[in-house]
Amino acid sequence: MGVSGAGKTTVGLALADRLGFRFVEADDLHPPRNRAMLAQGRPLSDQDRFPWLRAVGERLVAPGVVVACSALARTHRNVLKAHAPDLVSVHLALSPEAAAQRLAEREGHFASSALLDSQFATLEPLATEERGLTIDATQPVAAIVGEVGTALARGLEPSSGADAL
């Protein structure tokens, strides 16, 4: 989970490969209307977002899946958890400046970089009772994947909030 430019797809692909899991890119599940709004720099409302999140959640029902999904707010993660009660969220955290720099260097993504401010405004860190961890997204991908793998091997307890395990 995280804002645009956090590295969700890159880390998700590497993590799925390491774990031998299937990878799902949640952006591929957006309906055309959502994609058009995002391309225009228009943030989605929860009314727009919840059907998409339910479609993402349906992919989480099967075991052995890593999903790259923004899931910025706790209510968004709760929609996913309704489908996958054992959901583990990995918040790839970075500063607005680092995210903006990454987006400036990124090519070919449908979502407008104009959405970044609204994403940071929507972002809710993992709550204490949520199962997950927050990781510095500016680390190398291998370090992030290693940290997640170690946490999973230890049985990952509920999140400690903004601190990585």
Image: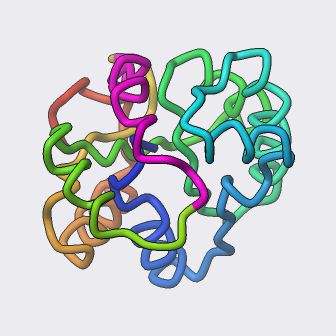
Left or right: residue 62 versus residue 9 is right
**Residue located 35% across and 42% down the image:** 91
Residue at position x 63%, y 75% in the image: 21
In percent of width and height, residue 65 lies at: 67, 63
Instruction: From the viewer's side, name the closer residue of 13 and 132.
Output: 13
Bounds of the magenta span?
Answer: 110-127
91 w.r.t. 63: above or below:
above
Which quadrant does the C terminus fall into? top left
Residue 15 in picture, x, y percent from top left: 45, 72
In this view, the residue in front, 6 or 64, is 6
Q: Is residue 33 magenta?
A: no
Q: Nearer the viewer, residue 156 or 119?
A: 119
- Does residue 62 sit above or below 34 in this rendering? below
Up/down of 81 relative to 165, above or below: above
| Scheme of image coloration | rainbow
The x and y percentages for residue 145 are: 31, 70
Q: Is residue 113 left or right of residue 159?
A: right
Q: Position of residue 86 (x, y in %)?
A: 62, 39
Res 11 quadrant in image: bottom left
Residue 141 is drawn in which quadrant? bottom left
Would residue 83 appear left or right of 19 to someone viewing this image?
Answer: right
Q: Residue at x 34, y 66 (%)?
A: 149
Whether 113 is among the magenta residues is yes
Q: Is residue 98 left or right of residue 108?
A: left
| Residue in the image at 41% along x and 46% along y | 113
